[in-house]
Image: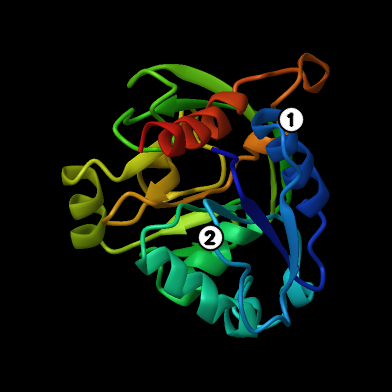
Amino acid sequence: MSFRAAVVTFPGSNCDRDMAVALQQVAGAAPLRVWHGEADLPERLDFIALPGGFSYGDYLRCGAMAAQSPIMRAVVREAGRGVPVLGVCNGFQVLTETGLLPGALMRNAQLTFVCREVALRVETSQSLFTAGYEAGQTIRMPVAHHDGNYFADEATLDRLEGDGRVAFRYVESCNGSRRDIAGVLNEAGNVLGMMPHPERAIEPEHGSTDGRALFESAVRSLADA
């Protein structure tokens, strides 16, 4: 069965091509490219990606305006049907603004843009995105953000921890995120938001191939379904 993915582009996205190339390299088929102003998504999608960037120039709050784009109604609907949705960096911000994921991404604690490779600990292998890793495994991916400081109240954080919905955690403090959270899952496990960029850790030339297993896990989940 072919893997049918879509990458959504917003005004100000700058990682959409990176995401499309990563998906094509892993899945062997080019993903569909969808503009934010479209009212609907193509039929029979297996995977939806919201890429990094600075949608709408990060005006108001990062991701707040993109969350109101026409296409996001379709993304929310497909996520509710169980289609896997990955939001990276700005895409993570959009997912929190739509309510698909809890919490919010705030200004980095040091009030500076962070752009470097970071070490992450895989907190769960029990999701379609992380099945290719081992729980407790340390991996490396780049980050590039100014508003990656994940915040949620203590009750929400406890629930995320208790339900195994923290996907990745920074090994060392990166941006002030509560409990060093770098990525979280929704309750159903089919929506993942993360600040690090797995699409920039696909080939040896990137300095790390640790992001490849995330995409491979998603492709395998469809094949095994």
Color encoding of the figure: rainbow
Whether the residues at callouts 1 and 2 have beta carbons within 8 Å, the answer is no
Mark 1 Cα shell of 10 Å, populated few (<14), some (14-19), many (≥20): some
Q: What kind of residue is marked 1?
A: Gln
Foreground of the two, 66 or 75: 75
Density class for disc 2 (Cα within 10 Å; few <14, some 14-19, many ≥20) is few
Residue 16 coordinates in the image, percent (x, y): 77, 54
Measuring 65% from the left and 77% from the top, which residue is drawn there? 66
Q: Is residue 164 above or below residue 151?
A: above
Cα separation, mark 1 vs mark 2, equals 21 Å
Residue 46: x %, y % from top left:
52, 51
**Number of numbered discs visible in the structure rendering:** 2
Residue 12 in view, yes or no = yes
Q: Is residue 76 above or below residue 30?
A: below
Residue tagged by mark 2?
44
Which residue has dot 1 on it?
25
Q: Secondary structure at mark 1?
A: helix
Residue 193, relative to residue 69: is it above or below? above
Of helix, strand and loop, which one carries label 2? loop
Q: In the visual, does 83 lie left or right of 16?
A: left
- Which residue does the image show at 43% across and 74% down from the upper left? 77
Instruction: Pick the quarter of the image with the N terminus.
Output: top right
The image quadrant that residue 21 belongs to is top right
The residue at the point 42 percent across, 40 percent down is 180
Please provide percent x and percent y for residue 97: 50, 74
